[in-house]
Image (tube, rainbow, N blue to C red):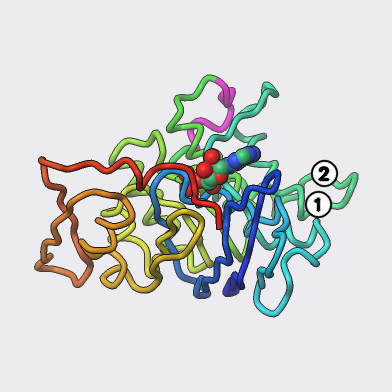
Amino acid sequence: MSTPVQVDDVRYAIDGIPLLHGVSLTAPAGRLTGVLGPNGAGKSTLLRLIAGLTRPVGGQILLGDHDLHRLPRRLRARRVAYLEQQSTTEQPLLVRQVVELGRIPHLGRWQPPGPADRAAVLDALVAVGMIEYAERRWSTLSGGEQQRVQLARALAQQPEVLILDEPTNHLDLAAQLMIMAQVADLGRTGIAAVHDLNLAATFCDWLVLLDHGRVVAAGPPETVLTPELIGSTYGVRVQLLDRPDSDRPVLVFDRDQEFSLGSTSAPKTA
Ligand code: ADP
Ligand code: MG
């Protein structure tokens, strides 16, 4: 089952400092939406709101027809999975046990995991190519392996909506491509903050470009990844190349840049 996510005029502030100024976007059902923008643009802040971890100070987020923040916590946890930018756990868990955490929203209070839960855990580990690590301690894995296990935890949750904050951080090229393809082909609604614009162009069906806590563009990749928009938000010069095999854009970066650090500074207050 897949469900669209609609973010409607969402505002968010910490200690009176506005971080999101009326963000609206629609993440189409069953598709992968990429959230782009320079450091500090508000991507993680937005994803934590969509995951239900924090509440907006204004506006609302709809999961299908339901206000996400009005859903009971447990029901929301069944429907929305969140992979944070930097996952850590203090507990000495095995890889399999980390992935089993994804089943908690589906289990009763004292109910142990059953066959369906174990199958979901194994399927998720296979999907991310980590099945042979199932009995290893999570803490002994490399950063990239840990990231893949955390993705398996989110997949084992079998959510309608998967929220991923820079899921390809720390991964080598093959793992980046594998994870992005995996998420794009799930048939679930995915919303991912992505730093690599060419990965976004290759795998995302819809892009939302944030800057200083506002949406500056949204649409299919070819409408968002333009030299003008990338230039004005990231403050870099890029060129667009034509791909012979697809309509999806490819960006290349000029070696000589005139950096204007203004575009990566703290958000303007408004
Ligand atoms: P991104 O993920 O796009 O890099 P974030 O959503 O993490 O951006 O942050 C957006 C802005 O909010 C940044 O300027 C950041 O410094 C600020 N910010 C995030 N969390 C806090 C906080 N707890 N207190 C104050 N400012 C914060
Ligand atoms: Mg972030």
Which image quadrant for residue 209?
bottom left
- Location of residue 251 in the rendering, given as x and y in whole percent from the top left corner: 19, 56
Are the residues flagged by discs 2 and 1 in contact, CB closer than 8 Å? yes
- Location of residue 123 in the rendering, given as x and y in whole percent from the top left corner: 55, 50
Distance between the alpha carbons at the discs numbered 2 and 1: 7 Å
Image quarter (top left, top right, bottom left or bottom right) of the C terminus: bottom right
**Mark seen at residue 107:** 1
* Residue that sits furthest to the front in the current view: 270
- Amino acid type, mark 2: Pro
Q: Secondary structure at mark 1?
A: loop
Task: Assess disc 2: are there few (<14), some (14-19) or many (≥20) residues with their C-alpha within 10 Å of its C-alpha.
Answer: few
Mark 2 or 1, nearer chain start: 1
- Location of residue 100 in the rendering, given as x and y in whole percent from the top left corner: 68, 42
- Location of residue 120 in the rendering, given as x and y in whole percent from the top left corner: 62, 52
Which image quadrant for residue 162?
bottom right
**Mark seen at residue 148:** none
Image quarter (top left, top right, bottom left or bottom right) of the N terminus: bottom right
Res. 126 visible in picture: no
- Amino acid type, mark 1: Leu
Q: Is residue 133 magenta?
A: yes
**Mark seen at residue 112:** 2
Q: Write the residue at 38% across / 68% down.
A: 217
Write down the region rendered in magenta: 131-139
Query: Which residue is at the front of the view, 21 or 156?
Result: 21
Q: Secondary structure at mark 2?
A: loop
Query: Which residue is at the front of the view, 135 or 253?
Result: 253
Q: Write the residue at 70% across / 41% down.
A: 101
Position of 236 compared to 69: left or right? left
